[in-house]
């Protein structure tokens, strides 16, 4: 497969189709926000477009805007929900950058002064992730 092709069987496409579960925190016509299953900090979540895009290179400008608006909104909720001092927003493009899931996504990771981001690739506790999703959902509507 060339780098520009979109793989319809990537894990986030399966989440969008409802083929695998996710802890959803926000959804509209263009975007979905949900918890990262291997969180690098309490409250680590992701925002994705509903339209297929591999990464920044094939994102439609309107879709970029829609996702970015939700990233801002969820970031504010995350700040409140976790009494955070900041958020790291991360967005990787192609394997050389560390991208592992080839559907455009933005990471939102709550940060606290003096606390480093945790390592990647460690499966989180399902109950804890569900509880964190609920905290963000509550902050989004308050
Ligand atoms: P990337 O390195 O591509 O920017 O990050 C992909 C992210 O997707 C990682 O943080 C990883 O933990 C997360 N991830 C991988 N598989 C799943 C999954 O099945 N469900 C969810 N919610 N997140 C996943």
Image (cartoon, helix red, strand yellow):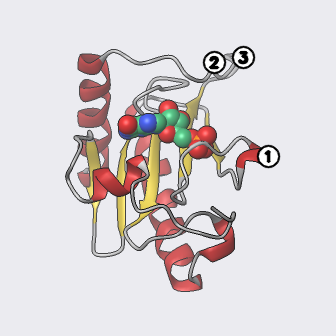
Which SS class for mark 1? Answer: helix
Residue 75: x %, y % from top left:
49, 49
Which SS class for mark 3? Answer: loop
Residue found at x 43% / y 31%: 43
Residue found at x 47% / y 29%: 83
Is the residue at mark 1 in contact range of ligand 1, meaning its CB lies under 8 Å from it?
no
Residue 26: x %, y % from top left:
29, 55
- Residue 119: mark: 2
Q: Residues within 10 Å of mark 2 (few under 14, many from 20)?
A: few
Query: Which residue position holds label 1?
Result: 96
Looking at the image, residue 80 lies above or below residue 121 = below
Looking at the image, residue 32 lies above or below residue 28 = above
Which SS class for mark 2? Answer: loop
Q: Which is closer to the viewer, label 2 or label 1?
A: 1
Give the distance between the C-alpha atoms of the residues marked 1 and 3, in whole angstroms. Answer: 29 Å
Sequence-earlier tag: 1 or 3: 1
- Residue 114: mark: 3
- Of residues 126 and 17, the one nearer the viewer is 17
Sequence-earlier tag: 2 or 3: 3
Residue 66: x %, y % from top left:
47, 74
- Of residues 135 and 92, the one nearer the viewer is 92
Quadrant position of residue 120: top right
Residue found at x 54% / y 60%: 104
Q: Residues within 10 Å of mark 3 (few under 14, many from 20)?
A: few
The residue positioned farthest toward the front in the image shown: 1
Image-based side of 29 in relation to 35, left or right: left
Quadrant position of residue 31: bottom left
């Amino acid at each position: 497969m060339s780098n520009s092709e979109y793989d319809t069987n990537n894990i986030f496409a399966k989440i969008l189709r409802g083929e695998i579960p996710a802890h959803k925190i926000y959804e509209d016509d263009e975007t979905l926000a949900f918890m990262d299953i291997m969180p690098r900090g309490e409250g680590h979540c992701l925002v994705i477009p509903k339209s297929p895009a591999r990464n920044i290179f094939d994102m439609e400008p309107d879709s970029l805007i829609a996702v970015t608006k939700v990233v801002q909104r969820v970031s504010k909720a995350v700040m409140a929900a976790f009494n955070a001092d900041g958020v790291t927003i991360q967005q990787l493009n192609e394997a050389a950058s560390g991208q592992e899931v080839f559907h455009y996504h933005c990471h939102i990771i709550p940060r606290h002064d003096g606390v480093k981001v945790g390592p990647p690739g460690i499966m989180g506790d399902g109950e804890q992730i569900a509880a964190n999703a609920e905290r963000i959902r509550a902050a989004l509507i308050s």
